[in-house]
Structure formats: C-alpha cells, structure tokens
Image (tube, grey):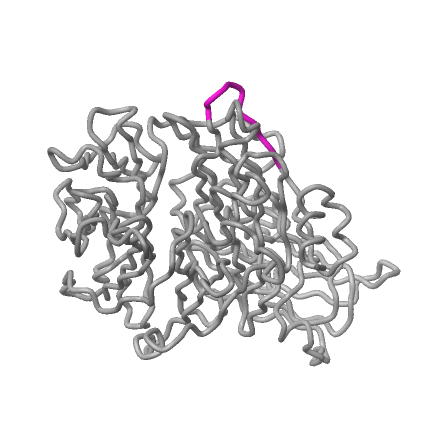
Amino acid sequence: MKAFRLLFALCCFPLAAHAQNEWVLQPYIEVTGTRALQELGKNVKGFMGSFPNNSFNVAVSEVGQTGLYTIHSPNDKTPQRIYVGENVMHGDFNGDRYTDFAIWKNLALYPIDTVMVYFGNATGIDTLGGVIMQSEPGHNLSNFGQRMCSGDINSDGFDDLVITASQFGNAQGKVYLYMGDSNFDSLPDFTILGEYSRAIFGVNCAVGDLNADHFADVVIRGNNSQTPNFSFGYLNIYFGGAQFDTTKDLTSIRSPLNGPTDGLSIFDANGDSIVDLLWAYRDSSLNTNKILIHFGDNDFSERFVKSPDFIIPNPDSQRVGVSGFGNVIANAGDMNGDGDDDIAIGAYYSFQGGGFVFVYTGGKVLDAKFDAAKGQAVEGQFGRSIDGVGDVNGDGLSDIIVGAPDWKFITRQGYWGIFLGDRRIPTSVQEKTDKNIPSVFSLSPNYPNPFNAGTRIQFSLPKAGELRMQIFDVKGALVRRLAQAYYDAGTHFITWDGRDAWGQPCASGVYLLKLSVFSPKGGEVYSATQKLLLTR
C-alpha cells in the first residue's frame, strides 16, 4: 500500500514524496509542443560519448522532423539544427573519428522507408545525406529503420549499424547489418530473417560486448504473435567476432505478452566495467512487468540460459502493478556522483495514460527498490522516450531527457523535459551501509589518462565539507568549474567530459585539476592539483 501511495504522490503531488527516501527528479528545462498532432518528444536521444565534432548533446523528434540542441541553460529551448526524419542513431561508421548520424525517414515523409547517414567532419556533421538505405522493394510497410542500434561488432575500429524491419513479410521481421568501413555504403553485409511468420523479429535491438571477448554482440527483440492464445516476447543473441555469422547463439526464455513490452538495453549496470543486458519481462503469475538483468562476463552464456543475475520487480507489485513498466530502459549515466551509471525505466501508460520514470542506482550491489522517480498525471505517455544526456548544467552529475508525445491527450502536441541528477539520490545498498570512512583527504589519479571522451576523478574525504573542483589550462585560465557543493565524508567520483563551461570541446593538451576542501568556517583544509592529458 505504501508503494501505491508513493506512486500517486510522484504523479500528482511530487513534493509530498520528499518524506520518503526516494528522490523526486527535478526539471531543468521543459518544452511543450505548439500545435495539434505535433507529438513533440516522440523520440529523444542524448549523445554521451560522441566525438568533439558533434556540438549537440540532445536530439528531440516530432512528427516529420528531429531537432538538435546544445543545452547548457534552461533557456536553450530552440533547436540549432533540424533534420527531416523521426529517429536518430549516432556512431563513427566510416572510421574517421568523427561522429556520424543515421536518421530514419518513414513513409509519411518518403515513398519508401529510408535511413539516411550524415557523415561528420572536422567542422561538424553534414546536412546532406551521404549514404541512403531503403526498405526492400515490395516491403514498404516493414518499419525499416524505426529501430536502430550501433557498435563495433567485428572489433575493426569502425562502428557498425543495425537496422530492423519488424513487419517485413507477413510480420516475420528482418534485421540488416551494415558493417562500418572507410567506404561505408548502402548495401547490407548481413541480413537475419525472422524464423517464422508473425515472429515480429526486430521490435528492438541493442549492441554491446556481453561476453567480454572485445567484440560487440547483437541482441534482437521479437514479439511472437503466431499463436493467438499465446503471444510472447523473446530475445535472440548473436555474438560478435572477426568473422560475424548470422546463426543465433542464444535465445531467451519466453515473456508472455500483454500490451507493449519492448524494453531492451545494454550498458554497465553493476559497475564492473563490463556491459550488462537489461530487458523487460512479463511475469504471468503476477500479471506485471519486471526487468531482468544478466551481468556481462566471459561466462555470460552459461549464466544466461540458467537465470537472470538480478531482477527489478514492478514498483507496485503488491497491488495491480505499474502498467507498462519497462517499455523503455535507458542508461541514465551517473546521476548521483557515486561513479556508477544508473538505470532509467519508463512506464508510459499507467493511470489512464499518465506515465512514470523510475531511476535505480547502479553499482556492485543493486537494489530492487527505485531511488528516484518522476510522474506526469496528464494522459501524455510521459516516459515514452528516455535517454541519458550527460551533464547539461555543469554540476558534475548526469541528467536525463524524457519525452511525452501524447501530452494533452486530445491535441497530442507533445512534451519533453530534462531532469537533473542529484547527490541526494540514494547510492547502492553497499554504499548506503559502507562505514569505511577514509582516514585522510586524497585525490586519486584520474582514469583514463590520457583521455578523449571523458575521464573519472576520484577523491576521498574523511569528514564532510564544502568542496570546489576546477579545471585550468596551462596558462592558469579557468576552463570549467566541475563542482562546488557540500559533500559528505566518503569516497566520491566526478566525471569531466573534456568540455569547457560553455559546453564546447576543449583542445588537446595538458590541463590542471585543482581540488579544494573547506571547513564549515570557510578555511581551506585540503588542496591538491594534478595534470590531465586530453587527446583529440
């Protein structure tokens, strides 16, 4: 009963939940659509890990187009660029160390479902498509390009692009793999066909190295509807390798279907530097959704066929459950500064179309109870799209973007908002109970160093105090203030993404990090400096 009351409070009276341990996510920026049927927030995307040529940190799609934003203040509500198309995937497909975009253009925009690749260069990202992929002749209603994912499947230094077409044939489904190359082109190198009619193979996909062999693996989700009395969701896993083949290596247990349950993601949820597999599963005994997590490692195959390593139950499993829990699963980044990426889970169709986003703290010991959340009571499908966007406000914590394309229900103008990370979001169970307070102040070497996309900085405090962390160039000019806040005693982490205070990529070179800790009376009690080497 407590869980139900809390969910209602998060949705309708968010400040009332402050009495609980859970943190209510706070908005940094909120934007609503301006016209009927705009469906703003249909898809949202953060560009964590992009190369410096990509100056954008957020993409927001609506009917017919995708806006790209560079957001570092609550006033950054206007897109800096607009592409025709409703979904975007990023990666370095031609191996030139510049971020490229792949954008889906559906039948409402083109006579054939199309994915157009825009290549990056030293000055940014092209606005004229360089490579065009299209659905096969006679299969214009296949949903080709509606779902895409990318990663280096054959470990050759090029990102590979995976495009699904879940309605290909008689809803059999088909998946197309385009291997990255300096001459990246529109011809698929591999295709994988669904195993039978109405396998609906390709409703979602994800790429990551699950078995720790340095080759990214491909996971495809399907929704079998061949048998009317028993429809089920499933995963097929194809291990990456120098010589990739299309024979499936693993198949999941069957997940009974009752409404959309397409959630699937790959990222490091347990803080061991190996990516993990997370997917939504329908528990028929409870008639609710839950999230299964399979930890990545070299024995992934053996453990996957036995059981999940961790289960996140439905937040309100004592009652009817939160409807649609796990429709979307996303890497939220490190929202509370404990050094581990956190898990964002959407439930966009609860309480007559109102939605929720739940955040679970990642780390070596996961917790089945959510640590932060946000709800929206209007029938807008809040949480229909979610992604991590990195640190948009310069406080050293990762933030998330959430879309609600049906906002205002009848008019469907749409909505998107960015919600901030906060150090008050509880850390993992192990860290909540860790009593090993450091005995001395210390600043550990950042890792990695040299670095490109980002580097993690660890420091220890034997007692609480006001902390300031700043980045300077070799001439002593302030580049960015990473943190200025009150920190409890313990070991903490802050990540620098190699950008300055205005969100612009810094040039290659040596930078100086200065850490200062102050007593309650204002006197400096500790100071340390170290060199960071940024390479572009």
Q: Is residue 31 magenta?
A: yes
Relative vertical location of residue 325 with respect to residue 503 in this rendering, above or below? below
In the image shown, does 487 or 238 lie closer to the viewer?
A: 238
Q: Is residue 525 left or right of residue 303?
A: right
Q: Give coordinates of residue 48: x percent, y percent.
A: 45, 49
At horizontal 85% and vertical 58% (from top left) the residue drawn is: 522
Q: In the rendered view of the protein, which quadrant contains the N terminus? A: bottom right
At horizontal 54% and vertical 20% (from top left) the residue drawn is: 34
Return the residue found at the far right: 521
User: Predominant secondary structure in magenta?
Assistant: loop
Relative vertical location of residue 138 with respect to residue 529 in this rendering, above or below? above
Q: Give coordinates of residue 268: x percent, y percent.
A: 45, 64
At horizontal 66% and vertical 66% (from top left) the residue drawn is: 528
Return the residue found at the far front: 229
**Magenta span of residues:** 29-38
At horizontal 52% and vertical 43% (from top left) the residue drawn is: 349
Q: Is residue 376 left or right of residue 65?
A: right
Relative vertical location of residue 350 with respect to residue 206 in this rendering, above or below? above
Q: Is residue 322 left or right of residue 79?
A: right
Q: Is residue 329 magenta?
A: no
Q: Give coordinates of residue 205: x percent, y percent.
A: 32, 53
Q: Give coordinates of residue 479: x percent, y percent.
A: 58, 46
Return the residue found at the far top: 35
